[in-house]
Image (cartoon, helix red, strand yellow):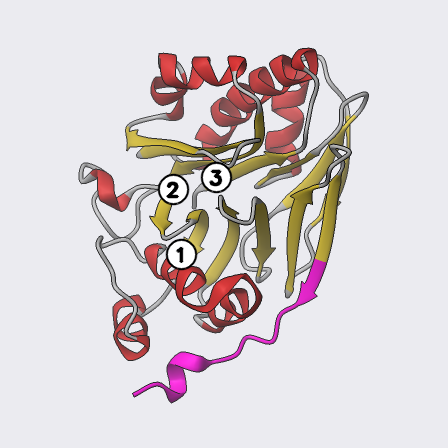
Amino acid sequence: MCGVFGFAGDLTGREWRVAHRLLWELALASEQRGTDAAGYAALTSRGELLWQRQPGPARELFAKREFGALSRRRVAMVIGHTRLATTGAPAVNGNNHPHLAGNWALVHNGFIPAHEEKAAKLRLPLHSQCDSEILVQALCHYGERAGPDVCLSFNGKQSVLALNNRNRHMLAWTNGEMPLVAFRVEDMGGLWWASTEEIAREALEAGGLHARFAEAKPGLAYRMEVDDDGQVVMHTQRLKATAAWRQAG
């Protein structure tokens, strides 16, 4: 069990300072789902990907000056993670989230069975012992259209948030085995994500904020981009769980 959270939107300076504090509160609230490691990836409006990960609870990572400095940047998208380790020791930082490949950064809550066997059949490189890495390698290899289908075919338990800094998109999906909720904060633009409504409400209460919630539907991939007017445009794609790895080799 891990925690994932994220945000997509183009905010004013004042709104972003409030949003930055909310990300901090989401990280703290998500510690209930894991304190073995924590990480985040942030995409600036210019397409620069900034990321950090380290062993230990989220409060240690998010208290660092690097995350604090993001409050003074123009940030369009963020994904975050709190880890309860399953495969891959958190002391080896490459096993922690976000996982990166090509233009992708990804955080995952869940477990992918036999991930090494599936990666070998698809000839996907793995640089860590963490099962979650197969997901970002599949996105990198198959792209944002076919990639989520292949990821879903790996079965197991999946709730995923991913960023692409070339296309400046965010992807989100769940197969229903792990929770994922979306919410919009009152009087603020953008779209937010958290593992559970309970976590989100805890973070919102700490910031004196309110929101409207919707559960992510299993079997749908949500693709978000920020348009020229600063609005979050979201497209949905029904996933087919194409079992490419079963036919590979």
Identify residue for label 1. 136
Answer left or right for 165 relative to 249.
right
Amino acid type, label 1: Val
Q: Give the residue pinned by disc 2.
A: 98
- Horizontal and vertical percent position of residue 158: 49, 57
Residue kind at label 3, given as amino acid type: Gly
Q: Is residue 247 magenta?
A: yes
Neighbour tally class for label 2: few under 14, some 14-19, many 20 plus, Cα within 10 Å: many
Q: Nearer the viewer, mark 2 or mark 3?
A: 2
Position of 182 relative to 87 (above/below) = above
Taking the image as shown, residue 91 lies to the left or right of residue 131, namely left
Q: Which residue is mark 3?
A: 3
Instruction: Give me the residue at 22% from left, 38% from top.
Output: 93
SS of the residue at dot 3? strand
Task: Report if the CB atoms under discs 2 and 1 are less than 8 Å apart.
Answer: yes
The residue stretch that appears in magenta: 236-249
User: How far apart are labels 1 and 3 at the CA level?
Assistant: 17 Å
